[in-house]
Amino acid sequence: MRLNVNIFICLFLCAEVSGIQSLEQVPWLPCMLVDERTKFSDEGHAETQYQHRDAGLQFGHPGDSALNPNTITFLVTGSKVDMRKYIEGAVVEHQLQCEIRRYSTEGIQVRWPGLGAQDHDIWFTCTLRHTNGLFVITSFLRHTPATPTPGQADYRNWAAIADREMLTTSTVMLVFTRTPSVWVGLVKQPSLHCQFDVDHKEANLTVEWSVQRRGERTTLFSHSSRSGQREGGGVELKGIGRGDASLTLPLTKQSSEGTYVCLVSVPPLFGSHDITLHIMEAPRVSLNVDSIISLVDTEKQKVVCEAEGYYPLDVEMEWFREPSGGGGGLLPEKLDTVLYSSHRHHQDGTYSLSAFFLLHASLHDSGSKYFCRVSHSSLRMPIRKSFTLIVTEDDSWNLLWLFFGCGFILVMVATLCVMLPRLSSARKANKRKPY
């Protein structure tokens, strides 16, 4: 496989030097052929073994020589359907995965209505997948063998493929999505992308959307071009005429989560993509205190951090303390006295949770910052809400001493006010007495 990748990189760089930058003109893609070998037990049960074999997609014309003769080559010849034009935003040698598999028509014996098709054609699927989940493309490759395979070509009767064999194919149909996985909030109206392309007009086409939830499958939309019958909604018929079968969902709620399946069929081929819809709602975080709390030494206060309106349930809430001045570069201290409420489930499907502790004010803690950190799968970075604690001395004893001091002075003044007149009267009486 490493040899294949090196050859492709060389070809890609040569195309860049010559001014060719479009992926539609890339001549070769490294792939993996997932081959199948089926064995049957004495009881008739089939056991399938998978073999991963190096292969490559080569784009060209019938009769071209293999660019890499040391591997299996699928020569994709001219067709109205070209998978390369749907590859966007991918660095091919790093972000594009190519996988080829055999395809069984499951007993449907219908000659493909495209040009050059034969009754004994055999089929392969080629799936191009962006490693970051930007798109998935499934193409159907038709191959006409020089010697027809006796019987129908399926998993019971696969024709062997040699290690350096070249198979000339053409792309007859593809199904493509740019939304393999969708994350959306509540009360939104997302569009699930599904696009297709067929090599002939007026195809006997069927488009169907369904959703799978907890093992149950529900049909959301279906349309048959032959009968003209249509059921459900969310897909524009004009769009189908252009190859766009994207589905617009109604306003989302918690029950909107599930696996949505876009199926496009032109007998004998059935192409589909699974699109996973995830509901995610970020929490709203608040504290029951202001950004600065002023308390007296030894005073207590309950501090609550509230996370509201989040979905799904995987929220994490923590309280930390950061000493005054940043703590000399030390990491914030996680509080181990935090208590939690139970999760509260709301009518819209979201949840709420409280994390609280009892704050004991002390003078050495004055200036410290406390913060609540909330982590959730809907957040790239945790949410932080903080407050600063200011602690002052307890002046109650000073007031008590002041009270007693003032009282003592008043008593002394009152005593003097009473005693002084008496002393003055006694002095005058003493002066009047004869000796």
Image (cartoon, helix red, strand yellow):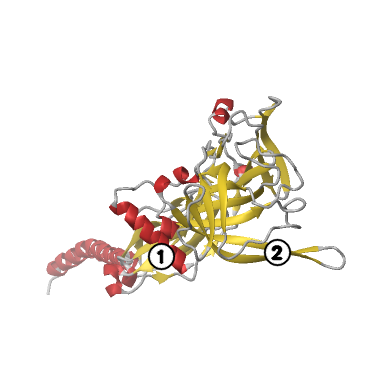
Task: Say which of 195 and 53 sits in front.
Answer: 53
Instruction: Name the spot of residue 180 as percent of width and height, x first.
Output: 54, 48
Q: Say which residue label 2 marks.
A: 37
Whether 379 is drawn above or below 220: the answer is below
Whether 374 is drawn above or below 19: the answer is below
Instruction: Name the spot of residue 161 as percent of width and height, x first.
Output: 63, 61
Residue positioned most to the right: 43
Regarding residue 89, the answer to whether it shows in the image is: no
Amino acid type indicated by mark 1: Asn
Taking the image as shown, residue 2 lies to the left or right of residue 347, namely left
Q: What residue appears at the point 42 percent right and 52 percent down from the top-left corner?
A: 90
Residue 332's tag is: none
> Badge 1, how many Cα within 10 Å: few under 14, some, many 20+?
few
Q: Say which residue label 1 marks.
A: 6
Secondary structure under tag 2 reads strand
> Badge 2, how many Cα within 10 Å: few under 14, some, many 20+?
some
Task: Say which of 102 and 212 sits in front.
Answer: 102
Regarding residue 256, the answer to whether it shows in the image is: yes
Q: What residue appears at the point 34 percent right and 48 percent down from the top-left corner?
A: 21
